[in-house]
Image: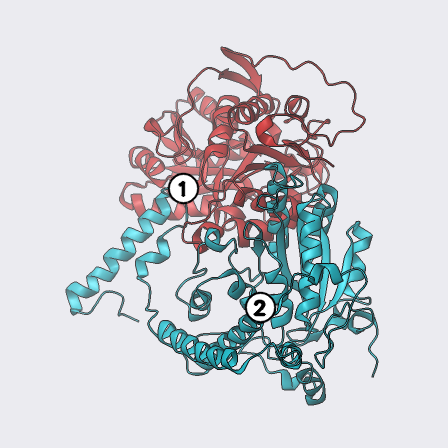
Chain colours: A cyan, B red
Amino acid sequence: MSPTGPLTDDGLVQLLTPTGERVTHPELEVWAADLTPERLRAMYRDMVLTRRFDTEATSLQRQGELALYAQCLGQEAAQIGSGHALAPQDHVFPSYREHGVAQVRGLEMTDLLRLFRGVDHGGWDPADHNFHLFTLVIGSHTLHATGYAMGVQRDGLVGTGDPSRDTAVVTYFGDGATAQGDVSESLVFAAVNQAPVVLFCQNNQWAISEPTTKQARVPLADRAPGFGIPSVRVDGNDVVATYAVTRQALERARSGGGPTFVEAFTYRMGAHTTSDDPTRYRSREQEEHWRRRDPIDRLRRYLEATGELPEVFQAELAGEADAFGEHIRTTVRSMGRPSSQSMFEHVYATSHSVVDAERAWFGEYEQSYVQHDGAEAGGHR
Amino acid sequence: MTVTSERTGTAGSTTTSSPAAPAVAPFPTGTQRLPLAKAINLGLRRALTNDPKVLLMGEDIGPLGGVFRVTDGLHAEFGGDRVVDTPLAESGIVGTAIGLALRGYRPVCEIQFDGFVFPAFDQITTQLAKMHYRSQGRLRLPVVIRIPFGGGIGAVEHHSESPEVLFAHTAGLRVVSPSTPAEAFTMIQQAVASPDPVIFLEPKGRYWEKGDVDLDAPLPAPHGAAAGADLDHARVVRPGSDLTVVAYGPTVATALKAADAAAAEGRSLEVIDLRTLSPLDTDTVAASVRRTGRCVVVHEAPTLYGTGAEVAARITEACFFHLEAPVLRVGGFHAPYPVAKLEHDYLPGLDRLLDAVDRALAF
């Protein structure tokens, strides 16, 4: 089978073959030059821990501890390679599957699960790690990223030549999102403003049950040049190549060279979410084909072949992953029900008489159960 | 494009071949008789002057000054980086405004006409309205969406609509509408100063009506100001004793004319300008209806599920034993906004309002 159109794997930038051989690329090699064995091990660690996170969260959903969960299984290289290319001052606008990027940015990973647990809509402060809240409406956040980048421009933090100040913005979205009008509008706004934004598309080939052929007739990266935005297709299961192309794109943005569209060609090895059933729409053969191209295996093979994955490191990492798993399970199970009054908080930044009145009424209503039934407030359902 | 820093105050470089910029006139002082559009223009000008983080975004708002000239002269004074001609993409305008607000800016978006807001409806309702809430107050979105709304100008379709309740129904948005030039001058500045997203509905049919504006008056706080001069309260604009007419935006002037006409027949109408639909100031209306016992609500938007329905429900609940008649509504019909030749049959004019007043008084 040799796919064409948006599913072709021709022309992908690759620096690490599926069997873990390091190959060179005339233009992009330089952007991977700083990947020392130590940094590659750090990437490997992030990939392994992200997969553990995915596994634990999926199990917690199956145990009824999470209402829903969206795995990033199979996309670890795309996320962790690009995440490692970011500078601390860069700002990330994720979709809702960017657990690997969150891991690289240093978030408390269990905070991501608060949304899936149903205890809040966004459990972290975006300012802590320059990692915005998840956005569930497909593609909407690409405009927020572009506007944020326009603000970075206005703040004079592009093209200063100071690597600690020059700032880029990256937004993650999927193949399905490319069909959304907002993504096209973000390309328009990014292009005409030459905004310092990297539009990072993870083409995982499936938008729930719809293959990318339902979204496009051409490779997704081919769209961007029509907007005046350079684009690149990269093997999204190759963490080294993903790092290199993202680093190049971020540097272009920071130096005032404008936006770049990156298409990381990868595969959603898991279901869309825990509510999905891929057996209804895709073949075991396809899944097996991509299982053999597992991004973590690829890096592991390379590191092992070069003697850069000592047993002591692997043992330590395995122990760290086990402790991480225990931490996830314990933390999620301890996330309690928020107070019913909290649903009225932060609707507005200032007082709003309708919200205030409804909050007061509902508080009295709940209290009436305490008075009449002796039941705990909030227990009447 | 080279974007210059806001903080340097230098003009943008996006204008390549504009005519020579006209000299900037000094900001007028004292009390001036101004059209409503000019009052908004001066309010925006003052906001741009006072806060370097304020920027205007929209279609044709730059050298043209907007299709209604509300931003006339502002591009020349503040430059293309602060008075931004955007691509023709309303979702993009609001979506990028959200991003700019997250970066610390205070964008004021102009939607060219009411009927063109819907491409941005998703960004406004799913993103702008909810981000403060879902971030547990960590993210503030001080974005103003200016929308010329309502009919009466003989326009083609999609240019005369009243979509206000679609926004008022959405938690997280503040929805206000000025009815006079003086109110417009103050309220647009308060909207810009508000920490919340504000849908600012400009009664385009009244853009050219003049009124006195005190340009030197201090600006009351947007929220919690004394005497209800903020964005949170209605205002009794004409006291009366026999019936309360509730209006906002373009229908306030209609209500005042109705009060004049009723007075000639010995009837005393109290007129309330709601000013804000979210929050809805039920207390001011209820206090009035407890005295008058009768209430008519008038707006251009269709009555089905409209502001009038909400006011009627709340007033019935708050004033049930004071009511002498059911709360009546006067408004648009459950039909698409009609052709221009029929719009004055569709719009709630003086006669239809007085008809409702008569019916309420006859109970």
Provide the residue designation for mark 2: A38
Q: Nearer the viewer, residue B43 or A296?
A: A296
Q: Residue A150, relative to residue B190: is it above or below?
A: below
Which chain is mark 2 on? A
Q: Residue B351, relative to residue B261: is it above or below?
A: below
Res A78 → quadrant = bottom right
Res B97 → quadrant = top right
Callout 2: few (<14), some (14-19), or many (20+) C-alpha neighbours within 10 Å? few
Q: Which quadrant does the C terminus of chain B fall into?
A: top left
Q: Are marks 1 and 2 in contact (CB under 8 Å)?
A: no
Disc 1 and disc 2: Cα gap in Å?
Answer: 61 Å
Under mark 1, the amino acid is Leu
Q: Nearer the viewer, residue B16 or B39?
A: B16
Q: Residue A220, relative to residue A317: is it above or below?
A: above
Q: Are marks 1 and 2 on the same chain?
A: no
At x 43% / y 53%, what residue is drawn? B133
Q: Which quadrant does the N terminus of chain B fall into?
A: top right
Q: Which mark is residue B80?
A: none
Q: Nearer the viewer, residue B126 or B345?
A: B126
Q: Is residue A161 left or right of residue B142?
A: right
Image coords of residue B303 (percent x, y): 52, 46
Which chain is mark 1 on? B
Q: Is residue B1 left or right of residue B322?
A: right
Q: Secondary structure at mark 1?
A: loop
Provide the residue designation for mark 1: B280
Under mark 2, the amino acid is Glu
Res B243 → quadrant = top left
Q: Nearer the viewer, mark 1 or mark 2?
A: 2
State the residue lying farthest toward the top: B30
